[in-house]
Image (cartoon, grey):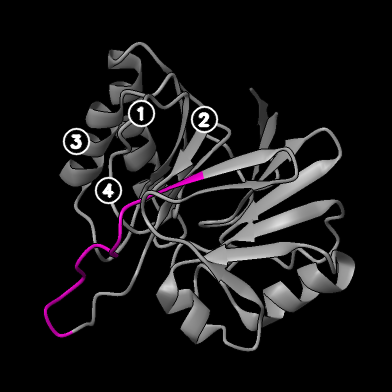
Amino acid sequence: MRVTKYEHAAFVVEDGEDRLIVDPGSFTSPLGDIAGVVAVVITHEHQDHWTPEQLTRILDRNPGAKLYGPAGVVKAAASFDFTEVNGGDVVDVGPFTLKFFGEKHAVIHSSIPVVDNVGVLINDTVYYPGDSFTVPTVPVDTLAVPASAPWMKTGEMMDFVIAVKPKRSFPAHELINSVIGNQMAYGRIKQLTEAGGGTFFPLEPTESIDL
């Protein structure tokens, strides 16, 4: 498999000629030129993780692609044919087995509603928690680590990496940071991934790692 990072929360997993897209939102460059897409996973309804325009571009190129998200996404994206998924669900689509974890977005502030959120484990290899620090109940080979967000502290991100103890990690959800801020965050992710015996890959948009 190959993982290719795009801006912010979006990344693509390839297995042969088939592709899975996760969280193509408003901070991500248009992804309508990607072919072979069998599924799109949206972890939650916030616009930095999905937009109607991104989904339309993807589906125009890949009309058979399946869409998966929690109940809040199904409601927010009612004009699209989503399949609802919740923590504990397992879905097979093309060459991908998707296992879902968690239920809710991390708290941003008491005045802001907490929306539905699922983390997704792809082929028992790549895990992304969405906007949460839900730790899966199984070992993780490759972890997409949220690097910055209004819902997190750096210490929480560090504890998450320690708890998951991945063999590999790469940054996600990074566009809220400045360049200097990302250097700091990436340094913390690297430090703790390596402390657990793993390797950190500071991927930039369109860079890939082979698993």
Give the quadrant of the C terminus: top right
In the image, farthest residue toward the top = 197
Could you tell me which residue is drawn at 28 percent across and 15 percent down?
195
Please state which amino acid type lies under the numbered disc 4.
Phe
Residues at marks 1 and 2, CA–CA distance in whole angstroms: 8 Å
Mark 2 or mark 4: name the one nearer the start of the chain.
2
* Residue 68 % position (x, y): 57, 63
Residue ID for mark 1 = 138
Q: Which amino acid, mark 2?
A: Asp
Question: How far apart are labels 2 and 3 at the CA level?
Answer: 22 Å
Q: Main secondary structure of the magenta part?
A: loop
* Of callouts 1 and 2, the N-terminal one: 2
Q: Are circles 4 and 3 on residues that touch, CB within 8 Å? A: yes
Q: Is residue 139 visible?
A: yes
Residue at image coords 64%, 88%:
79
Q: Disc 3 or disc 1, which is closer to the eye?
A: 1
Q: Are marks 1 and 2 in contact (CB under 8 Å)?
A: yes
Closer to the camera, 207 or 104?
Answer: 104
- 176 left or right of 162? right
**Magenta region: which residues?**
99-111
Looking at the figure, which quarter contains the N terminus?
top right
Query: Distance of mark 3 from mark 1, alpha carbons?
Result: 17 Å
Of labels 1 and 4, the one closer to you: 1
Q: Is residue 46 visible?
A: no
Q: Which label sits in the foreground, 2 or 4?
A: 2
Q: Is residue 86 above or below residue 36?
A: below
Q: Is residue 204 above or below residue 62?
A: above
On screen, residue 65 versus residue 72, left or right, reads right
State which tag comes first along the sequence, 3 or 1: 1
Label drawn at residue 133: 4
Q: Which residue is mark 2?
A: 124
Circle 3 sits on which residue? 159
